[in-house]
Image (cartoon, grey):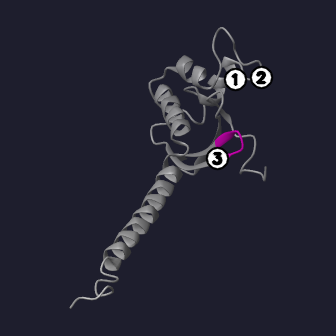
Amino acid sequence: MAGYLDHYGEGEEKREKLIKRTLLTIVLLLVVGGVLFFYFKNYRQEQLVSRFFESLQNKDYQAAYTLWGCTESSPCPAYPFDSFMQDWGPASPRANVQDYRITRSRSCGSGVILTVDFGQDQEERLWVEKKENAISFSPFPGCPNL
């Protein structure tokens, strides 16, 4: 004769397995999401700097100057094209940008500081303002506590 409590707890193992799988999936998704966020957080700014260096490699200095945030119609008063050419043109110390590598990308307030290695112990820190998506030299060596 079967009693009322004979089947008590039969579904517990299935429920425990389901809860464990669900928790494991959530933790796994959080870890993967965190890694992806960390890796791609500054992706747009890194791509902008890569386009900038591609323009310099192709000797399209006007396009590179535009990526700097300056155009012929609205030049940067504090950084005219002549100064840009002194810094990035064929006679500049940074003329050989063939071997550039972005070695560090760090969010800092309203922008991103990108450390670019040109090889031969040549390094430059560039600032990309997130809102305007314009490049400039980094105003500080690292990110101050903002």
Mark 2 vs mark 3, foreground winner is 3
- Residue located 29% across and 83% down the image: 7
SS of the residue at dot 2?
loop
To which residue does mark 3 refer?
A: 107
| Quarter of the image where the N terminus is located | bottom left
Q: Is residue 37 above or below residue 43?
A: below
Q: Nearest the camera: 108 or 97?
A: 108
For the residue carrying disc 1, how many other residues have a C-alpha within 10 Å: few (<14), some (14-19), or many (20+)?
few
What amino acid type is highlighted by mark number 3?
A: Ser
To which residue does mark 1 refer?
A: 83
Looking at the image, is mark 3 or mark 1 earlier in the sequence?
1
Residue 99 is situated, as x and y percent measured from the top left of the image, at 45, 42
Q: Is residue 29 above or below residue 24?
A: above
SS of the residue at dot 3?
strand
Mark 3 vs mark 1, foreground winner is 3
Q: Residue 78, labelled with which disc? A: 2
Q: Determine which quarter of the picture holds residue 87.
A: top right
Farthest-out residue, left: 1
How much space separates mark 3 and mark 1, taking CA atoms? 27 Å
What amino acid type is highlighted by mark number 1?
A: Ser
Residue 12 is situated, as x and y percent measured from the top left of the image, at 35, 78
Residue 100 is situated, as x and y percent measured from the top left of the image, at 49, 42
What amino acid type is highlighted by mark number 2?
A: Ala
Span highlighted in magenta in the image: 108-112
How much space separates mark 2 and mark 3, taking CA atoms? 25 Å
For the residue carrying disc 2, how many other residues have a C-alpha within 10 Å: few (<14), some (14-19), or many (20+)?
few
